Image (cartoon, rainbow, N blue to C red):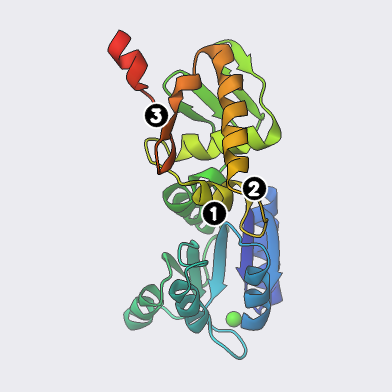
């Protein structure tokens, strides 16, 4: 389940947002101050942050700047909320590192649409939408992997691994990146654990002749590709 951190000191707004998010299937954490928000981020990284500009003490803009300056949080998707509609403030927010910007009062439908658009762009694995690459389909909402009518049985870790590969196809991912994005950033696991699970995933995919979609890129990591070299040559 995808996790969204809502940083907002006005409890009525925080509640309204979190009710809508939970209804849409997200897990929600609320932080009322910059310090609480930083503590939450120091724990488990959320998939996306909704950040209010005006907070007691440190501002949302200062928080966004700090997160953009640190390697661990640099890629965090951030939507900034504010009561200010001035163009200059909007630019300050975007300069601070917010990916998107919404002015209060906003409609919750618009906020949800912005969240989905940002996740599609920056963290597609956090969305529940089914993904198809070639003949292979993965559906997080039903937790099924299929090729046509045939279902592939995969373990929980292999499912997350395949989902990450399928939402980021044709790109090479190092073992360290895969550990970060699939296992979470606060686990201590050896990199060869990735190899073990990739091997299991290939074994599962061989049931539907898709094992070669997961390529080993020597010295770099792994890549999911729609058109394996071997198949392209024999076709
Ligand atoms: Ca506020």
What residue appears at the point 58 percent right and 28 percent down from the top-left corner? 199
Mark 2: secondary structure: loop
Ligand 1 lies under 8 Å from the Cβ of mark 2:
no
User: Is 30 located above or below residue 183 in the figure?
Assistant: below
Residue matched to label 3 = 225
Residue 86 in the figure: left or right of residue 205: left
| Near-viewer residue (141 or 35) | 35
Which marked residue is nearer to the observer: mark 3 or mark 2?
Answer: 3
Residue 126: give x, y in percent of width and height.
Answer: 56, 47
Question: CB under 8 Å between callouts 2 and 1?
Answer: yes
Residue that carries the numbered disc 1 in the rendered image: 112
Q: Secondary structure at mark 1?
A: helix
Residue 231: mark = none
Disc nearer the start of the sequence (2/1): 2
- Residue 159 higher or lower than 27, as above or below: above
Residue at image coords 49%, 79%: 66
Q: Residues within 10 Å of mark 1 (few under 14, many from 20)?
A: some
Residue at x 49% of width, y 37% of height? 165
Of the pair 152 and 84, the residue shown nearer to us: 152
Whether ligand 1 has any atom under 8 Å from the Cβ at mark 1 is answered as no
Q: From the image, tell me which residue sits under label 2.
A: 24
Mark 3–mark 2 contact, CB under 8 Å?
Answer: no
């Amino acid at each position: 389940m995808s996790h969204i951190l809502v940083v907002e000191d006005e409890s009525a707004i925080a509640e309204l947002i979190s009710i809508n998010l939970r209804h849409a299937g997200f897990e929600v954490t609320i932080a009322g101050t910059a310090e609480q928000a930083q503590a939450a981020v120091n724990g488990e990284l959320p998939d996306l942050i909704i950040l209010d500009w005006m907070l007691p003490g440190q501002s949302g803009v200062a928080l966004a700047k700090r997160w953009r300056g640190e390697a661990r949080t640099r890629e965090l998707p951030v939507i900034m909320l504010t009561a200010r509609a001035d163009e200059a403030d909007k630019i300050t927010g975007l300069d601070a590192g917010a990916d998107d910007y919404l002015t209060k009062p906003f409609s919750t439908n618009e906020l949800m649409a912005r969240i989905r658009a940002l996740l599609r762009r920056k963290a597609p694995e956090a969305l529940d939408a089914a993904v198809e690459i070639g003949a292979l389909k993965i559906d997080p909402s039903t937790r099924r992997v299929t090729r046509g009518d045939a279902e592939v049985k995969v373990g929980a870790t292999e499912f997350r691994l395949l989902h990450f590969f399928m939402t980021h196809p044709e790109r090479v991912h190092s073992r360290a990146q895969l550990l970060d994005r699939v296992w979470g950033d606060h686990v201590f696991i050896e990199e060869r654990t990735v190899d073990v699970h990739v091997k299991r995933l290939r074994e599962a995919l061989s049931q539907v002749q898709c094992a070669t979609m997961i390529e080993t890129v020597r010295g770099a990591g792994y890549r999911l590709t729609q058109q394996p070299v071997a198949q392209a040559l024999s076709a």
